[in-house]
Image (cartoon, rainbow, N blue to C red):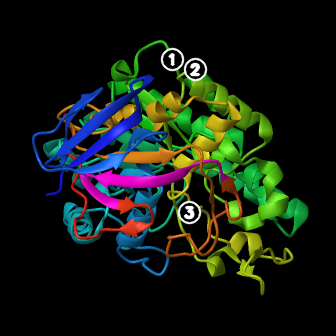
Amino acid sequence: MQNYLIKNIMVVNEGGTAVKDVLIKNGRIEKIDRSIQPDILVTEINGEGLHLLPGAIDDQVHFREPGLTHKATIYTESKAAVAGGVTSFMEMPNTMPPVFTHELLEDKYTIASNSALANYSFYMGTSNENAGEALKTNKRKNEIAGIKIFMGSSTGGLLVDNYLTLDKIFQESEVLIATHCEDEKIIKTNFERIKKEKGVLEPSDHPLIRDEHGCFESSLAAIQFAQKYNTRLHILHISTEKELALFSNMKPLGQKNITAEVCVHHLHFTSNDYSRLGNLVKCNPAIKAPHNREALWQALLDDRLDVIATDHAPHTLEEKGVARNAAGLLTLPANTEGSYERAHAGLPLVQHSLLLMLHYVKEGRITIEKVVEKMSHAVATCYQIADRGYIREGYKADLVIVDMNATTTATKENILYKCGWSPLEQFTFPAAITHTFVNGNLVYGNGHWNESNKGERLLFNR
């Protein structure tokens, strides 16, 4: 294995930034010091003027394999992740078939071991019928990300709306439970009412159908279950101001039993963007009115929201009901009856999540230290990930070099998602990812790829 010495780089880690040297040996961070004189053969990288960050860890992605590989594969999306500075991911169970058994779960680990360029873990799926199988994760605490519960509708029978099933899983689970919280009855009632009123639904109706009330009621129910049994609960993709009253910053993250995630698209887009992007920004939970975005930012900065993720969920342009014009630009068709309802929900984001947050660093909305905290440190702490998420001696060398004086524009030519598009196309980010190390291997460096080494299975200190 090649060893590296990164010289004179601004190391962003654990709340501070300082110019250091970092020695990478045998896949781990061997030494961090002001001036390192190695006694081993190394490849030296001049880090002057650049920043070194711990690789981002995305706790919620949908990489679509197996069964939905026309949208994405673990290989294509992990490559996009690495290009964007994401060195580890935790992937959801709504593939085909849904991950309702441990045999199917292990099938995904096998696929990843042969193809993932980033480190990986997977969630066990749940239905109203498989509580016993899901709870077998108690015997595998250190090797599975957690149990995923969709409390709002998804695909392939993954909805869990039977309160007896929910009660059993929350009572007996010894691993983290991650929930998608939207109330199914409220969604259906809203849909039927608005459909009757308007006849033809459009993308801007999405946040009215999947509204703040539906999110709040479902999150409240999940929290009540967790409090009843002292269960470790992590609520995914918080999207409303109303839900924020349910979360606290009164304890350090490591002492919290109930934690929350916010996604980059809820921090960036608002309901005003439906007129410009239409079904391209249709996702669940919906992107909502601007006051929600402002409240999410405040809660992120004051630590009521604990981690930043993407909920990366690629669909083809055809599934979105969108095409490209002769110039290659995305064009929205005229809204017609059924076009909103047919459009799949989800956005591809993992290649640009870190860059988008660095945009907000340049805007002065958040510090680079806080971005590292929320995208790396806090995810590792929240999930108790072993030896990752920090720039520490002895830790795995999952590292990203960033040039804060360069720019990156998202275009259809440089997007690596298999679906081939992004809601952030033509956006210019005020930074560039120059190098990404995964387990000490330089997988991506200045546009060049080394795919000979695959990512590793994440382990958890539980």
Question: Amino acid type of disc 1?
Answer: Asn
- Asked whether 115 or 445 is in front, the reply is 445
Left or right, residue 122 beside residue 94? left
- Image location of residue 127, percent across then percent down: 38, 57
| Residue 165: mark | none
Q: Quadrant of residue 5?
A: top left
The spot of residue 70 in percent (x, y) is 47, 81
- Counting labels gives 3
User: Which quarter of the rendered picture does the N terminus lie within?
Assistant: bottom left
Task: Indicate whether 277 appears above or below 15.
Answer: below
Task: Give the quarter of the figure containing the C terminus.
Answer: top left
What is the CA distance from the residue labelled 2 to the residue labelled 3? 27 Å
Residue that lies at the very extreme toward the top in this rendered image: 250
Residue at horizontal 33 percent and vertical 49 percent from the top: 45
Q: CA distance from mark 1 to mark 2?
A: 7 Å
Secondary-structure class at tag 3: loop
- Magenta segment, prevailing SS (helix, strand or loop): strand
**Mark closest to the chain's N terminus, 3 or 1:** 1
Q: Which residue is mark 1?
A: 249
Task: Identify the residue at image location x=74%, y=56%.
Answer: 206
Residues marked 1 and 2 touching at CB (< 8 Å): yes
Instruction: Name the residue carrying label 3.
Output: 348
Q: Which residue is mark 2?
A: 302
User: Mark 2 Cα within 10 Å, few/some/many (few <14, many 20+)?
Assistant: few
Q: How far separated are the C-alphas under marks 3 and 1? A: 30 Å
Question: What are the residue bounds of the magenta stretch?
Answer: 429-443
Would you say residue 448 is visible in this rendering? Answer: yes
Q: Position of residue 61 (x, y in %)?
A: 44, 56
